[in-house]
Amino acid sequence: QKEVEQDPGPLSVPEGAIVSLNCTYSNSAFQYFMWYRQYSRKGPELLMYTYSSGNKEDGRFTAQVDKSSKYISLFIRDSQPSDSATYLCAMMIQGAQKLVFGQGTRLTINP
Amino acid sequence: EAGVAQSPRYKIIEKRQSVAFWCNPISGHATLYWYQQILGQGPKLLIQFQNNGVVDDSQLPKDRFSAERLKGVDSTLKIQPAKLEDSAVYLCASSTRTSGRYEQYFGPGTRLTVT
């Protein structure tokens, strides 16, 4: 079993739709939860991070962490064609040295 | 602020040949990472440096992969000899202690094809 599971998609939605991306994990020691966005032929860039449980909002993006269910989500409101990318969840144990990434979900927003 | 630089951007080699990748992190970033990203998968950490010392190389195939970070700045990753399964994008990332290790800045990657 992988430490972090993420549905690879692909996911295709119309412009303006609400998008929900999710990851599950097995290691209860994870404390930091991140979402990275990766455009084609580019390196990943940090989109949002959350420490422990709870919600965090940044513009059209909302990150949620439910540690009791070992489940994290990223919501994108009013999706735009420029949001088309691969979204990677990543997690880290507090005090540890490395990120563990999910497989990534490829998202396409259709105009 | 300049980002993480990597070269070359693309490389095609035959199996059993050797190849080297170069990375220049963001100025002042003490921590440097090399990741391997196989098509359709998330990045996998190969090696992490803190200044010029190795922090974690537990997933580096040491029989064929080597990496160094001289003077705590630039880094090179080498594969010798290459196998078909080494075809992937090799990403370099850097971070600072003050920003926390969760905030890693990635370069554009080197796309390696082994034929």
Image (cartoon, rainbow, N blue to C red):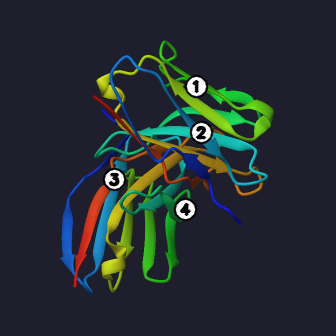
Label 2 to label 4: alpha-carbon separation: 32 Å
Q: Is residue A108 left or right of residue A43?
A: left
Question: Quarter-wise, where is residue B26 in the image?
Answer: bottom right
Q: Which residue was labeled with disc 1?
A: B57
Image position, residue B68 (x, y; %): 66, 27
Q: Residue furthest top?
A: B63
Q: Is residue B110 left or right of residue A8?
A: right
Q: Are marks 3 and 1 on the same chain?
A: no
Label 1, residues with CA under 10 Å away: few <14, some 14-19, many ≥20: some
Image position, residue B19 (x, y; %): 48, 27
Label 3 to label 4: alpha-carbon separation: 18 Å
Q: Residue at x 77, y 55 (%)?
A: B98
- What amino acid type is highlighted by mark number 2? Trp
Q: Quadrant of the C terminus of chain A?
A: bottom left
Subunit that carries the residue with mark 3: A
Marks 3/4 in contact by CB < 8 Å: the verdict is no
Image position, residue B29 (x, y; %): 74, 50
Q: Is residue A55 above or below residue A15?
A: above
Label 2 to label 1: alpha-carbon separation: 18 Å
- What amino acid type is highlighted by mark number 4? Thr
- What amino acid type is highlighted by mark number 1? Asp
Q: Residue at x 72, y 57 (%)?
A: B99
Question: Quarter-wise, where is residue A18 in the image?
Answer: bottom left
Q: Tag on residue B22? A: 2
Image position, residue B44 (x, y; %): 45, 37
Label 3 to label 1: alpha-carbon separation: 23 Å
